[in-house]
DNA sequence: TTGTAAGCGTTATCAC
DNA sequence: GTGATAACGCTTACAA
């Protein structure tokens, strides 16, 4: 066909066809028909567990999506935004992994309904990659050494002499309840990232109190910070599970008249640029967010070409900033 | 068919079919074939002009996408992220409006290559909606009274006695050059939103100097603020074209030891929650960002059902916060 | 209620 | 190099 540019076509024929097309009002091949014939739609489904606005609030998600988009582009593929299961409410008509013409799927931090989404794609025998979630079997996974990394930051803080340390966690379950975690709560955490990072922190500070945020944002951190720093025996260091949460803690400290790091040390996690945080430079764990996305995209590409994609384990790099210092005496 | 649930099927047959399906390893209808037959893919393409990470940095974009997603969901449609034209580099293999199986398209602030993208969808006779961009002809557009709104904020500032007023604009062209705009620069602005808001501000302060940012973020605002507030005859008020830019200006003011609003008044635009800006509450123009997205989605839905969708003009609401005050004497 | 047949618009293949 | 032909897997309409 002239449009596909696949077969060599003579100039004359080409023009003749184009003229006819023009006359008939034909505007190129129909992608729907092409995708049926080819067995490829050129679309990769991305499953998010929050609504769009919330998901993209997180800088890590943004970076990951960026890397993902970049890696699937050469494939001629675009990203289709999908939300995972949830209640029957949306299930009625919203597009799902089973009804959307996707060639492959990427499950992003679908902690809650991961298994459900996974079952759906697996049933359709679609290539699938799971980002930071425990998919168990033989599906390629992109993971991070969250626990080890968090342990490293905790050790750093311990080395500075801190003993009264509190942890500010990411949401622990899909319910996203805000507040202090009680004794057995750690075992009921369903979000893998949260669980791993908490474990890493407690490897170093076994009994450290932990407060769960309802999301990863500065305002959530601020809100949590007010509560965490308000207590009588307030901590001298807070290990936050994300940079934006850490930024919120810093704001709360400023609000309470505490200097960082003289009165309070704060560590983050992610190593992203937090808009407006200057002049502070967080002590944090730098994770290769964009690379993670890219790796997911490449894994998808590999599987689409029939190759097997291996799981990848990324590591974080500890970066000392100016938000941690010796424990106050 | 049993799976479609369209035709009434007896229980016995249903089970028989299901068993056969199971045996043959059939896992439901192929969405690609269905979309060809139906002539619908259930996908709405969203054209962004930046890469994902950058686009979603802007709170307004996030909210708009949210509203859009919500409005197209009942349609059974998902959002496919697409980037507009650009150089030949990406054009090679990246998915485009012409190759993706979309039922309709939404063009989001595609200032630069809007016409190009528009031509592509129009050629395919797809329903299309343009968000805040001048599409000229009879394509439905979702617009905002940017100029009038900005004029209102400027009047408020004028009423407070300010005369030395500077404007901080959003990017003026796709090139996104940062710096003071010279005399004729206003006429060379290709981004509609930027042009309209600048015009509104200059309706009230005709000769006001304007500085162009390279993007809508706090750090951009901070960077611009350092330059704008560093001059000898620094302004007593800055009209920023977005809330996040305004937040950056406030940070720059703090940095320079200026109090807001005592020494410097600042206005924003958008009325979004700026993460971490508390305790300031911006004087700003609240725009219905989510509604804009929803309206775009509904317009798309209407067109998909054969109805005609009218253009919609949204208006902003002026909201006085605590970042503007009387001009210092 | 169940079964059957005809296309949706491509693209790949094969004979010319 | 060019033109015809046969699927791709579904949905819908119509006949049994």
Image (spheres, coloured by chain):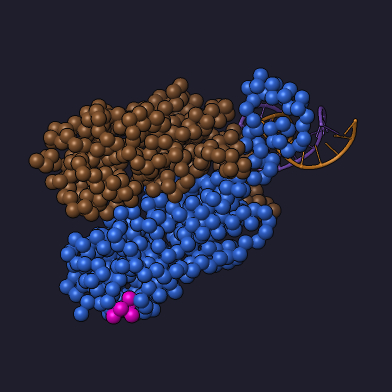
Chain colours: A blue, B brown, C orange, D purple
B257 displayed left or right of A278: left
- Say if residue A113 shows up in the picture: no
B88 displayed left or right of A163: right
Inspect the magenta stretch and tell me whether residue B212 lies in it: no
- Please name whichever residue, A140 or A237, is drawn nearer the observer in this view of the structure: A237
**How many marks on residues?**
0
- Say if residue A148 shows up in the picture: yes
Q: Which residue lies furthest to the front in this view?
A: B232
Q: Where the C terminus of chain A falls, by quadrant?
A: bottom left
Q: On screen, A308 above or below B172?
A: below
Q: Where the N terminus of chain A falls, by quadrant?
A: top right
Name the residue: 40% across, 24% down: B310
User: What is the x, y in percent for residue B155?
Assistant: 19, 31
Q: On screen, A284 above or below A103?
A: below
Q: Which residue lies furthest to the left in this view?
A: B329
Name the residue: 65% across, 48% down: B17
Name the residue: 17% across, 73% down: A232
- Please name whichever residue, B140 or B225, is drawn nearer the observer in this view of the structure: B225
User: What is the x, y in percent for residue A159?
Assistant: 33, 80
User: What is the x, y in percent for residue A259?
Assistant: 21, 67
User: What is the x, y in percent for residue B222?
Assistant: 29, 49
Q: Residue furthest top?
A: A23
Q: What stretch is highlighted in magenta?
A: A157-161
Question: Magenta region's main secondary structure?
Answer: helix
């Amino acid at each position: 066909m002239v449009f596909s540019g696949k077969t060599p076509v003579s100039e004359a024929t080409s023009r003749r066809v184009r003229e006819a097309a023009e006359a008939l009002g034909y505007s190129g091949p129909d992608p729907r028909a092409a995708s049926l014939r080819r067995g490829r739609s050129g679309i990769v489904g991305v499953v998010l567990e929050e609504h769009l606005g919330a998901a993209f609030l997180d800088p890590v998600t943004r970076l990951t999506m960026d890397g993902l988009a970049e890696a699937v582009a050469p494939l001629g593929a675009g990203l289709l935004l999908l939300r995972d299961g949830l209640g029957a409410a949306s299930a009625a008509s919203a597009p799902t992994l089973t009804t959307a013409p996707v060639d492959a799927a990427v499950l992003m931090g679908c902690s809650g309904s991961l298994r459900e989404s996974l079952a759906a794609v697996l049933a359709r025998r679609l290539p699938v990659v799971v980002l930071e979630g425990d998919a168990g079997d033989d599906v390629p996974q992109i993971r991070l050494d969250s626990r080890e990394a968090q342990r490293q930051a905790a050790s750093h803080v311990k080395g500075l002499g801190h003993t009264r340390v509190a942890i500010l966690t990411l949401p622990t379950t899909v319910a996203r309840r805000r507040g202090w975690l009680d004794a057995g709560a750690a075992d009921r955490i369903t979000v893998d990232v949260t669980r791993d990072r908490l474990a890493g922190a407690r490897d170093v500070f076994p009994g450290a109190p932990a407060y769960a945020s309802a999301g990863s944002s500065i305002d959530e951190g601020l809100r949590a910070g007010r509560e965490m720093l308000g207590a009588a025996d307030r901590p001298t260091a807070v290990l936050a599970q994300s940079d934006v949460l850490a930024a919120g803690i810093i704001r709360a400290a400023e609000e309470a008249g505490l200097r960082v790091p003289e009165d309070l040390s704060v560590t983050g996690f992610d190593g992203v640029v937090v808009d407006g945080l200057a002049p502070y430079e967080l002590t944090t764990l730098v994770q290769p967010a964009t690379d993670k996305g890219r790796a997911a995209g490449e894994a998808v590409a590999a599987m689409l070409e029939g190759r097997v994609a291996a799981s990848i384990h990324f590591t974080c790099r500890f970066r000392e900033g100016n938000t941690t210092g010796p424990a106050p005496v």
